[in-house]
Amino acid sequence: MDIKKDILWRVYLSFICIVVLSLVVMGRVFYIQRVEGPHWRALSDSLHQKYVELDAERGTIYSEDGQMLSTSIPYFDVYIDFGAEGLRDKNGKRFKENLDSFAFAMSTYFGARDSSGKEKSAVEYKKELRRAYNQGNRYYALRKNLSFEEYKAFRSFPLVRLGRNKSGVIVETNTRRLNPFGLLARRTIGLARENAQNVGLERTYDSLLRGSTGKRLVRFISHGAYVPVEGYEIDPENGKDIITTLDVNIQDVAENALMKMLTESGAQHGTCIVMETKTGKVKAIANLGRRPDPARAGFRYDEDLNYALHTTEPGSTVKLATLLAVLDAGAVSVNDHVEVGTAGSQYVAVRNINDAERSPKPVLTVREAFAHSSNVGMAKLALKAFGEDPDKFKGYLHRYRLDRPAGVGLVGEEKPMIPKWKRNKEGLHAMLTMSFGYAIEVSPLQTLMLYNAVANGGKMMKPYLVSAIRANGSTVRTFEPKVLDEQICKPEVVKAARSCMEAVVTEGTAKEVFKDFPFTVAGKTGTAHVAGGNIRYSDGVYQASFVGYFPADAPEYSCIVVVKTQPHAAKHFGGQLAAPVFKEVAAKLFAMNVQQKRNGVMPLPADSARYLYAGYAPGIKDIFSSFGFRVRDSAKVDDWGRFDASFNGAIAKPVSVPKKSIPDVRHMTLRDALYVLENLNVKVVAKGRGKVLMQDLAPGTPITKNVTINLLLN
């Protein structure tokens, strides 16, 4: 019995000891978690260090005149570490003293709305901040996506202005890519995307634009937040800037003209490229595709794909290559005759060939066959020159670089397609088909290269989009115009081809479009019946195009317009859809750039000591007199005048205001320009502020019903 009691006593004693020990352990655990927890967690976090990457600032893409086309803007995410010693010092006295004013500042400046757009008053801000403080939240999301201006104001708020250590404020800086001009050339400039592959110049020059990342040693606190460790940092190297050949004003003209035609016709998509003739610089490249717009229960046009680089059957615009080849081979001259008939179709050698429009007469000269875009005529010319050796025709296409990409410097440019054949009927059939624009696929840019070479006297220039690369304001590399071929064919052939292209506008398929045009242009219409993929010829889809250059006597720019229609569209010819876009682009660029060069009048810099004023002469004279300026007026101008002013005085010259044609309103104030133009029943659209710098309708242009003139003020 004594033994049993002795054993039980020992068991009870052991049990009591275990219970006491357990209570001590549990008490210690509770003390460590609740009392010493923040201290040990901070100590643990302080031992957790690693290097994190520092993103470099991505370079900016500029237009040739210095306008930002794509740039990175910073935005800021703000968090608060309520476990920071500065906020916990003296039982949170600093936090409590600043809480009311900080909550009031947040509610007042941010319009009583939080990051999600939910309304939040100062009382609600105060309540949430106090709750987060009591919970010891180490990474409380206060505000996200602040702009630089908002962040600058935020830094002056109560509590925040005490500094990071005392306020616990953590700021994360991010960047977002921005296209300041929105739609303009967006597909060519490109998109820099985090979750998808870049496109356009952003992709081609990504390695230069993104720079090189840096490194920083950081000490993590909680919830992924960290603080940098001083002295352990490698600065990132910012990306380089890309200077393009694009001109914002020319791009705007091309984009608007194309958009207007696509909207009117409801076409599927279109492209318009403008190139500087002598250099090959691409000054504008517009690509617009039709996309559903659920917001308006309809559709809209957007820069969705770079159609300028996509290869398709070009249609009649390739007839220039055929013309150059047969003339250079010596088979015919432009004044020779070719029988095309009047039935609209003929069997030529191995295949039947249709003409889209009936010929005006059964026998045409070579020039007339080209001007009226006769498929039969061009096929017969190709048969005469290359019927015995179709490979020779393919050799000319190689010489004109229609069998390889243009190499403009954009990823995604498609390779052209020229069929392979044997020396039999199949080869002859393919050669005849290619002669009028089918069985061959080229991009609009490649077509433009060939026409630009003719405009340039036979010298083929490589098209390019980037003129310079800069780093920290200094140019590190420049790109100069590159000649691909000094003379693609004999000079007399180029001269003859230019006369044929001018005939297209004066007597051929584009005659009605350019009737009464104030200056000469040269070009070629094209209409291709589209098939491929899910589209069949029976669907009635067409590709309308016009390509050429202006002014015809001394070309400054070459341009191509390509529009793909909806099925069975009422208008589908190149002269109906593409030529009017070309016409609008040519008219505006002539007024903006070419005319001023020819007249020797160029826009003066803002700090010039010589100024031009135009407007109501008596009013301008009164202004000059009030400032003590001497006005020399030998013509006794008493109505509308132009004043060439410098520090030596002003010279007055009369300005004529004809009743049936557009007057010259450059250098007038908007008020005077409106008075003159609206009295002539001309509608006015003005952009900018100041005096009239440019007008898109050249002086002397006949005034027609509902005519509209665009004025650029500066």
Image: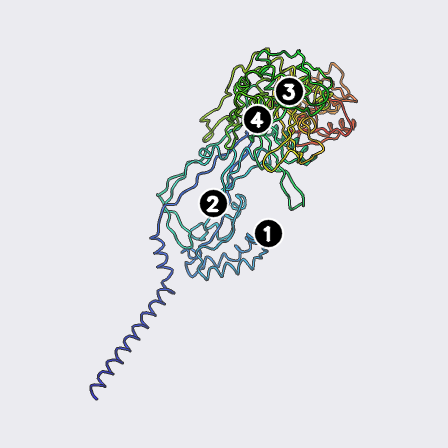
Disc ID at residue 348: 3
Quadrant housing the N terminus:
bottom left
Rate crowding at label 3 as few (under 14), some (14 to 19) or many (20 or more) other CA atoms within 10 Å.
Answer: some
The image shows residue 504 at horizontal and vertical percentages of 68, 19
Question: Quadrant location of the C terminus?
Answer: top right
Q: How far is disc 1 from disc 4 in space, using C-alphas?
A: 61 Å
Q: CA distance from mark 3 to mark 2?
A: 70 Å
Q: Amino acid at mark 2?
A: Thr
Which residue is identified by label 4? 440
Residue at mark 2 to residue at mark 4: CA–CA distance? 52 Å
Q: Residue at x 42, y 54 (%)?
A: 223
Query: Of the residues tagged 2 and 1, which is closer to the observer?
Result: 2
Give the residue pinned by disc 2. Answer: 173
Within 10 Å of disc 2 (Cα), the crowding (few <14, some 14-19, many 20+) is few
Q: Residues within 10 Å of mark 4 (few under 14, many from 20)?
A: many
Task: Of the two numbered discs 2 and 1 on the same chain, state the one appearing first in sequence.
Answer: 1
Q: Quadrant of residue 660?
A: top right
63 or 188: nearer the viewer: 188
Amino acid at the residue labelled 1: Gly
Q: Nearer the viewer, residue 583 or 40?
A: 583
Could you say which disc has been placed on residue 111 in the image? 1
Tell us which disc is closer to us: 1 or 4: 4
Of mark 4 and mark 3, the one earlier in the sequence is 3
- What element does badge 4 sit on? loop
Q: Earlier in the sequence, mark 3 or mark 2?
A: 2
Sequence order check: which comes first, mark 1 or mark 4?
A: 1
Q: Amino acid at mark 4?
A: Ile
